[in-house]
Image: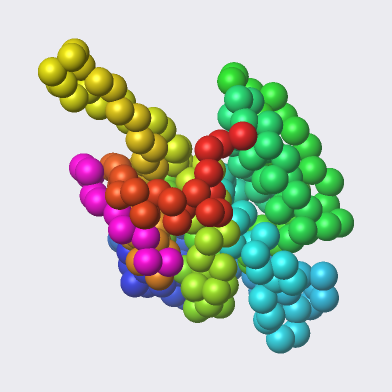
Amino acid sequence: MYDISKRHHALRLLEQGLTVSEVSRRTGISRYALREWRLRVDQGRDLYAVRSSHCPRCSGVPRKPEHPRAYAYLLGLYLGDGCISPVGDPAKKIWALRISCANSWPGIMRECAEAVHAIRPDNKIRFIPCTGCTEVNSHSKHWPCLFPQHGPGKKHQRKIELETWQQEIVDEFAEAFVRGLIHSDGCRVMNRVRRPCRDGDRWYEYPRYNFTNVSMDIQRLFTDALDRLGVQWTQMNRKNISVARREAVARLDEFVGPKY
Ligand SMILES: [Zn+2]
């Protein structure tokens, strides 16, 4: 896991002209990670120089994406089941946003594609079949501008922090953000409980929500949003957050509900 200060230190060494191998030896950071960080920095500079007015983040004055509700939802999906990776020759600086959607939930797959379209309307969306799921895939030079959490390695092995503009969107559209997180890494399940009675056992069913993610940072973003919405939650274990109280489940049902 590389923290932000270590990363800045490494990038400064690269800027001073040290080679990737030298910086890797000095800092213990993998060469793969260093190359990808440098690529990202270069990409940001190039894009800034051309000032693509089609990108809200690297145009002259950075602004928020036009459809903040769709953005909050897509950010939730991305943090749950998404990744950003270079397409083809890294020098071309084209990136794929890839969100893995279970085939069992065609409605969620559609909603995901709609959110991608709202954020990058000019980029084609592809549906790539995988085992048991479909990858919603879209190419753009600007995914790292829009999702600066992108970085080498798995999300739970690096620090995931929102930038100020993202946090503002998440605060304002907390429901959409939570919906995205639950659609990717959560579920609504029925608990069955048996209660013994005089005339035999009775079964009771009640719904609850589970959210499973190994990144403590992502768990925290989820529970912060729940707090903001006044939804009570419980940390079940290291990986799982549960929402089980009747009024909390009812509140989530207002804007999440069962997968579809
Ligand atoms: Zn951009």
Coordinates of residue 219 in the picture (x, y in percent): 35, 54
Quarter holding residue 140: bottom right
The single residue placed furthest to the top in the displayed view is 200
Q: Quadrant of the C terminus?
A: top right
Residue depicted at 53% across the width and 61% down the height: 175
**What colour scheme has been applied to the protein in the rendered image?**
rainbow
> Is 102 a magenta residue?
no
- Residue 5, by quadrant, is bottom left
Above or below, 83 relative to 131:
below
Q: Give, as a single range, the part of the protein colored magenta.
A: 229-238
Residue 24 can be seen, yes or no: no
Q: Position of residue 115 (x, y in %)?
A: 71, 53
**231 or 182: nearer the viewer:** 231
What residue sits 74% from the left and 71% below the top? 66
Q: Is residue 157 left or right of residue 234?
A: right
Position of 207 with respect to 58 (left or right) is left
